[in-house]
Amino acid sequence: MTAPSDVGIEPAEQPPDAQTGSSRSVQPSLGEAVYAARREAYMKTIGSRAVAVIHSPPQSVRNGDVLFPFRQSSDLHYLTGFSEPETTLVLRPGAEKARIVMFVRPRDSKRETWDGRRAGVEGAKERYGADQAYPVAELDKRLPELLANIDELYYSLGLNPAFDQTVAAIIAKLRLSEKKGRRPPRAVVDPRLVLHEMRLRKAPDELTLMGRAVEISIEAHIAAMRQARPGMTEYELEALINFIFRKNGATGPGYSTIVGAGDNGTILHYTENSCTLGENELVLIDAGCEYQSYTADITRTFPASGRFSEAQRRVYEIVLETQKSAIEMTRPGITIDDIHKHCVENLTAGMIALGLLEGSVEERIEDKTYKRFYMHRTSHWLGMDVHDVGAYTNDGTPRPLESGMIITIEPGLYVAADAKNVPAEFRGIGIRIEDDILVTDAGHDNLTAGAPKEISDIETTCASSQFDVL
Ligand code: GLY
Ligand code: MN
Ligand code: MN
């Protein structure tokens, strides 16, 4: 495994804030050179006749005057390290001047008193690599000239309807000036194809951040195993996990933390976390922190009491053996579909052995009845987004894994509390085991191997003293 310390990155310099002299202004998480190199690589691929426009997502109202916390678009963050809303990045590989243009919120001491610090136009140029930067209010006026007479506009239609309208209006406006020699782009191309291929293969600096996200998340899972007791609530465990994320400098969870006790563990995206842990229940925790915009994604399932019952043990061992053998087969050249097929076969054999299904493995896969107990896919890409970007197929054919990709491997078995025609002892058992696997030249590294998953290791961890949260 690539240990976090293996690949050194210098933290970005902390220059004083342009206007206030404060050293507290937000900095890019990696050195500016990292983002510059990414931009150059991207611009080289799209070519000198193209311009890319990448826009941050709109801020969303939670309720009343309260907004949801803003999270920068991963694409925009990947190319700039800039985390503020209302940002548009324009990359112009063929331009002589102003190849990198940013539209940002301008400095505004009144607004900053209310909403927080801004890098502003100067900050965008000084710290985020913009050759030119303008206040966001100037976008409508300036973007048309940046898009005139290029061949391809790399812009993601359909993600942000309001900004789609802005782009459409610019194209319409440029059509009006064709006679004067200012024409609109000839084609609109999805910028994500190239960019997401870049993001799919993790560079050493990204593996360092992933390594830290994983390390913090493992600490949180171990703490939850140590702390959990029958009578505790799911939300107490959620609070403990999220506390450990923040205590270690993570932004928080990379996705909503799932803590499901008993049959809540059979609900795949259970996030209410509102129940009490029962005496003989398993607890399924699917939680990973986001550290510097990279997220871990780990699931562990353990007994609230610290000891697996016989029925729980039988189901757990099937999922565990399936997961371990799936990890073992991971190497360049095989596909996520190969891994999924292996898991479906193993789990279906396990369902028959447990008496959840009858007949042969082939029959139950053929008629898809295995989906009663294993209804999701086994793997997804992992990185800046928990379900990270990148094509899963080449025109419908599963793509082979390559070194530098990170996938999850997360088989499970879920027997609903009211499942018909199954042995009663298995009802209400939900188990998933999920690790984050880096594909390497030699095969793979299990980045999350430090989170206990062998039955004996889980029982030892659960029996160890409570985690000292402060
Ligand atoms: N935590 C979401 C997932 O496992 O895919
Ligand atoms: Mn996952
Ligand atoms: Mn997960």
Image (cartoon, rainbow, N blue to C red):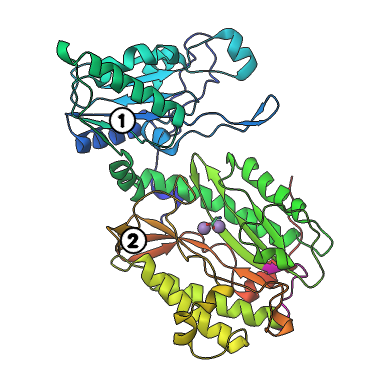
Badge 2 marks a residue whose secondary structure is: strand
The answer to the question of whether label 2 and label 1 lie on touching residues, with beta carbons closer than 8 A, is no
Which residue is label 1 attached to? 36
SS state under label 1: helix
Q: Which residue is mark 2?
A: 440
Q: Position of residue 292 (x, y in %)?
A: 49, 39
Circle 1 packing at 10 Å, graded few (<14), some (14-19), many (20+), is: some
Using the image as rendered, state which of residue 82 and residue 24 is in the foreground: 82
Q: What's the residue type where badge 1 is placed?
A: Ala
- Let me know if residue 398 appears in the view: no
**Is residue 309 located in the magenta-colored stretch of the structure?**
yes
Q: Percent position (x, y) of residue 197?
A: 30, 47
Region in magenta: 302-310
**Residue sitting at 33 percent across and 61 percent down?**
440
Residue most extreme to the bottom: 359
Residue at point 82% right, 65% down? Answer: 230
- Could you say which quadrant of the image residue 154 lies in? top left
Q: Nearer the viewer, residue 64 or 48?
A: 64
Q: Is residue 269 left or right of residue 382?
A: right
Looking at the image, residue 224 lies above or below residue 98: below
In x, y percent, where is residue 389? 39, 48
